[in-house]
Image (tube, rainbow, N blue to C red):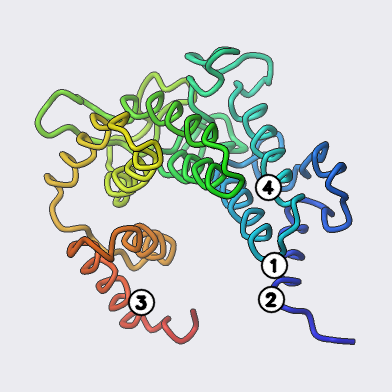
Amino acid sequence: MSSPTQLDSFKEAMQVVYGPFESLSTEQAMQWQPSESSGGHRGRYLWTDAFGVLNFLTLHKEAGDQKYIYLPNRLIETVHAVLGYDRSGQNRLPGASDQNPLGGGLRIGKIDKRGPDGDGQYHHYLTIWMFARNRMSVAPGKPSYNEQAITLAKAIHPRFFVDIESNPPRLVWKITMDMSRPLVSSEGNLDAVDGFVVFSLFASAEDSQCLATEIANYQRVIDRKGRHSISDDMLDLGMSFWIAHWSSATDTSAQQMGARCLEKLGTSGNLTFY
């Protein structure tokens, strides 16, 4: 018996979260219902499922099987049907409608409704979800996915800013489920640079200035905060490195940010382990 390949291990890990899918035909994949095992409210958690979409697209690239285009599409539909609604599942989030289903943003999917780890909307979860939508527009070649990412970007962007017209504004990292007010007063380490890079990707895909105002707002926060702080936290460090790579070929500050991420990883003593 041959040893499992990296691709086999990748599929096995995905099936722990999303249930058996390897034996599905293309036709079955079009009707697939993802398992409710992503760790969130009513079976969906935005961060996990964003990476689920990206992982399915990776499987499509590596295996070349068309079902790995239908599976992430079904996952997206399921996420929107759960996290685009209130916790009862009966009503769309305020601001959303049948014509604009993403107008109210998307819930995190926390198990608890309230409390220090209660449900709401996270800026960094939403940006990675929008990025996954953007990648869906690249892999199947359907621009509508990126257009939907832009629609969501415009809906959530002003809700995370405090005194958006001030100079400079502040950007909070968590707001209520209905996007009516902040749930924290602090700024996230990555949110401004994350928003700047990801929103720029969306706009470049459309070859337009459709998000020029939003991108400029992120730039104002970046300018106020100055040089990006590289954290010891492995998730924060990894995301910083990921953000930097998008423009490191042409942007000196991104090159420096990536180099400082590598330096931090080395001095943390975890370089060999990771």
Mark 3 and mark 2 lie on one chain; the one further toward the N terminus is: 2
Task: Nearest to the eye among marks 1 and 3: give it.
Answer: 1
Q: Amino acid at mark 4?
A: Ser
- Give the position of the N terminus as an image quadrant: bottom right
Query: Which element carries disc 2, helix, strand or loop?
Result: helix
Q: Residue at x 61, y 42 (%)?
A: 45
Distance between the Cα atoms at labels 4 and 2? 22 Å
Front tag of 4 and 2 = 2
Residue 24 at x, y percent in the picture: 87, 51
Q: CA distance from mark 3 to mark 2?
A: 24 Å
Q: Residue at x 56, y 13 (%)?
A: 99
* Residue 218 sits above or below residue 11 on the image: above
Q: Position of residue 66 (x, y in %)?
A: 74, 51
**Dot 3 lies on which element?**
helix
- Residue, x 74% and y 79% (percent of image)? 5
Q: Secondary structure at mark 1?
A: helix
Q: Which circle, 3 or 2, is nearer the viewer? A: 2
Cα distance between the residues tagged 4 and 3? 29 Å
Residue 38, numbered circle: 4
Residue type pointed to by label 2:
Gln
Residue 6 got which mark?
2
Residue position for label 1: 10
